[in-house]
Amino acid sequence: MPKMLIIDDDLHLRKLVLTYAELNGFQCKEAENAERALSIVHESDFDILLLDIMMPGMDGFETLAELRRYSQVPVILLTSRTEEYDKLLGFNLGADDYVSKPFSPKELMARVSAVLRRSGGKASDTLQFGKLSIQPAARTVLLEDHAINLPPKEFDLLVKLAQNEHIVLTRSQLLEKVWGYAYSGDVRTVDTHIKSLRERLGHYRKTILTVWGVGYKFEYKQEG
């Protein structure tokens, strides 16, 4: 059973989300502020967090920044703020999605399922993009039902990009996430591996986009 942490100072909203989440098969915990949430995260593992931005004390942005120091658990931000700057800030801090209040609980659960699919969470062990299938746990990639043998770092790069679909990852971030914080190689190492990875993906090479001067992002467009 996938586990969800609901972080919001609005008790009514927490209970509403909890009700729908439990009906969809989630085991839920609640936190009314950032301090309590971070304490709970240190004590238990979760598959996804729903995080309100406007909270007393530490706000959602500060909470997310602190969380990303030690955890890559998927996070959906909940907020009544709709400015583009706020959304960009949330994504740059590592949010996986952004839902504006008021929202439909059914839509929220659909977003939760989509994020878990992208992240390889319990809702699905497979990242599926058209005829490209990525299975992180089994470390396999299928393209049109044919297995593609990827070197370990190219596989890790593909998974990390696919798990963060539509989000730009800098070369430095990819070095840290794929090679580890202790890796001291040149950022051009990323470019070399991306080039090789694209060649192995055939026409799906176009899913890996270069963001000039920044890094790369994964973006799948439905085939016509």
Image (cartoon, rainbow, N blue to C red):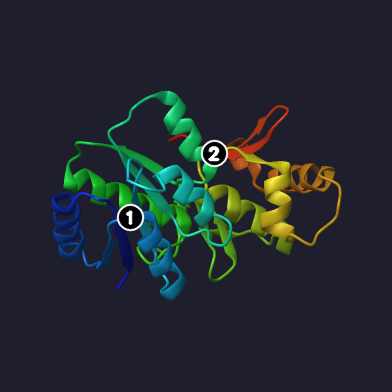
Work out whether residue 50 can be spotted: yes
Instruction: Please provide percent x and percent y for residue 214.
Output: 69, 32
Helix or strand or loop: what does disc 2 sit on? helix
Give the residue displayed 42% in from the left and 67% down from the top. 39
Instruction: Please provide percent x and percent y for residue 93.
Output: 53, 43
Q: Quadrant of the C terminus?
A: top left
Work out whether residue 203 can be spotted: no
Q: Residues within 10 Å of mark 2 (few under 14, many from 20)?
A: some
Number of residue marks: 2
In the foreground, 59 or 107: 59
The residue that mark 2 highlights is 92
Please give left or right for residue 41 compared with residue 79 in the image: right
Helix or strand or loop: what does disc 1 sit on? loop
- In the rendered image of this protein, does residue 219 appear above or below residue 65? above
CB under 8 Å between callouts 1 and 2?
A: no
Q: Amino acid at mark 2?
A: Asn
Q: Quadrant of residue 139?
A: bottom right
- In the rendered image of this protein, does residue 172 appear above or below residue 18? above
- In the rendered image of this protein, does residue 217 appear above or below residue 157? above
In the foreground, 56 or 187: 56
Task: Calculate the distance from the C-alpha at mark 1 to the C-alpha at mark 2.
Answer: 22 Å
Which sits earlier in the primary sequence, circle 1 or circle 2? 1
